[in-house]
């Protein structure tokens, strides 16, 4: 009987260790566009247009938001690694930017890599704001008494200039 008791403890210890090590599993992820170098190299400045780029590379990950019109398309690909539930750490990133002229013809194709990844550190756990800071209870009970007050809208609080 003692043999089975020691065996049960050993099995429990192995199971507990397996659960603990499960949190140390290295996770690899891929996000975004899957780059095919032959297809990217097939797009030629001065020859291709928006339609041919879409048929060759597909729809872009996102388009440029500044400037006049839809003149820049971006194809983004990122490979990340992290341990279990930690924040992903980018290991490789490629951004392909396709620029179009006003007629929709490809003007240039640029590639950038991991050097464009910026790591930012937020300032604390709260967003800094200007003005008065309210406590939890002031936020919760701050509107009591203001409903219906003059100039505040609601019953009895119409516009005093009418």
Image: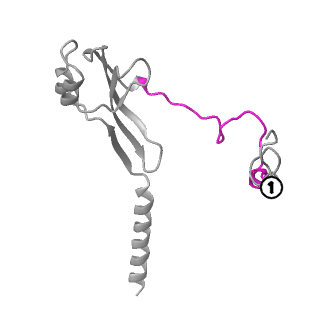
141 inside magenta stretch: yes
Q: How many residues crowd around disc 1 within 10 Å: few (fewer than 14), some, or many (20 or more)?
A: few
Which quarter of the figure is the C terminus placed in?
top right
User: For the point 73% across and 33% down, which residue is it?
Assistant: 130
Q: Is residue 20 above or below residue 99?
A: below
Percent coordinates x, y for residue 91 in the rendering = 37, 33
Which residue is drawn at the image coordinates 19% and 16% (left, top)? 44
Q: Which part of the image, by quadrant, shows the N terminus? A: bottom left
Quarter-of-image position of residue 96? top left
In the displayed structure image, the side of residue 88 where residue 96 appears, left or right: left
- Residue at (83, 46) in percent of width and height: 150
In the picture, residue 5 is in which quadrant? bottom left
Q: Is residue 70 above or below residue 146?
A: above
Q: Residue 144, image x and y in percent?
A: 80, 55
Residue in the foreground of this view, choosing between 119 and 65: 65
Residue 79 picture location, percent across and down: 34, 36
Instruction: Residue under label 1, please give it.
Output: 144
Residue 121 position by quadrant:
top right
Q: Is residue 30 left or right of residue 83?
A: left
Apparent side of residue 109 relative to residue 159 in the rendered image (left or right): left
Q: Which residues are magenta?
A: 116-143
Outermost residue toward the bottom in this view? 1
- Colouring of the image: one colour
């Amino acid at each position: 009987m003692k043999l089975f008791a020691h065996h049960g403890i050993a099995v429990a210890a192995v199971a507990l260790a397996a659960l603990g090590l499960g949190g140390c599993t290295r996770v690899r992820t891929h996000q975004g566009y899957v780059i095919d170098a032959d297809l990217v190299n097939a797009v030629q400045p001065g020859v291709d247009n928006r339609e041919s780029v879409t048929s060759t590379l597909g729809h872009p990950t996102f388009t440029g938001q500044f400037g006049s019109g839809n003149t820049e398309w971006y194809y983004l690909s990122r490979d990340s690694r992290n341990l279990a539930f930690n924040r992903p750490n980018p290991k490789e990133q490629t951004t392909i930017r396709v620029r179009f002229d006003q007629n929709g013809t490809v003007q240039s194709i640029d590639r950038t890599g991991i050097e464009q990844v910026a790591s930012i550190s937020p300032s604390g756990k709260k967003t800094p704001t200007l003005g008065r800071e309210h406590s939890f209870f002031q936020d919760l009970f701050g509107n009591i008494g203001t409903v219906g007050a003059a100039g505040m809208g609601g019953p009895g609080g119409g516009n005093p200039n009418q």
